[in-house]
Amino acid sequence: METTTIQQRLIDLPTTAISDATGGHTNVAGNIKPLSDHFKIAGRALTVRLPDGENGAVLEAISKAQKGDILVIDAKGNTNRAVAGDFVISLAKGVGVQGFVVDGVIRDLAAIRELDFPVFSLGTTVAAGFKHGGGTVGVPVAVGGVTVRTGDYIVGDVDGVVVVSQEEAEQIARAAEEKMKKDELREAEALSNGEASIRAYLDKVLSK
């Protein structure tokens, strides 16, 4: 199946359904949150590993990114120094990067919200990152307690971020779609006739 097709299927699914399909094993820690609730991303990861407090390799990643890529940045959970501000985010948006997932923080929040660029991070800071050098693009990283490789799929929405390995993307997408159908049937059964159907559903579940 083509990458674009998988990507579209994943972006049409809530992260909760994908989490259920993966067994919850690749849920990024919940403290990595979207900076605006409406942000939704689904695409291939391009990974960045940064030394503590540094951000220089982010520019290298932007230069290497393909349209639709999501930069997944391992900043070691540093909340004192930003991996990017509005200028760097503008560069990323300008070359077609879809979003950032950061185990760290960004700055210039108001301007980034005006850019309407999806960022999932530990929050914000006023301090810029150092540019002393170092950092690696394209290597496996750990973000929010989950290992991410370049080419894996990242899905994020208001509930959080889930990683889908590139090898299992088709299987996980199918399982999540099936879960959604089951949930719709369950809702129709339980809520079709107000209190009567709710009580009938509860009796059915609790009698098992």
Image: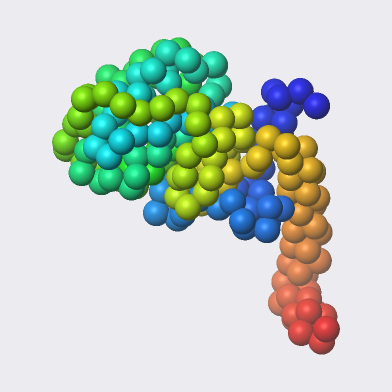
Q: Position of residue 103 (x, y in %)?
A: 38, 43
Look at 31% across and 36% down and name the residue there.
Answer: 51
Residue occupying the point 55% across, 22% down: 68
Residue 109 appears in the rendering: no
Q: In the rendered view, tell whether residue 176 sits above or below residue 43.
A: below
**Residue 46 placement (x, y as % from top left):** 51, 27
The answer to whether residue 169 is seen in the rendering is: yes
183 left or right of 155 in image: right
Where residue 30 appears, as percent x and y from the top left, is 45, 55
In the displayed orientation, state which residue is furthest to the bottom: 207
Is residue 185 or residue 64 the one in the foreground? 64
The residue drawn where x is 26% and y is 32% is: 54
- x and y, in percent, of residue 160 in the image: 50, 49
The N terminus, quarter of image: top right
Q: Nearer the viewer, residue 164 or 123?
A: 164
Left/right placement of residue 20 relative to residue 114 reads right
Front residue of this view, candidates 136 and 79 = 136
Check the image and name the residue furthest to the left. Answer: 127
For residue 137, which quarter of the picture?
Answer: top left
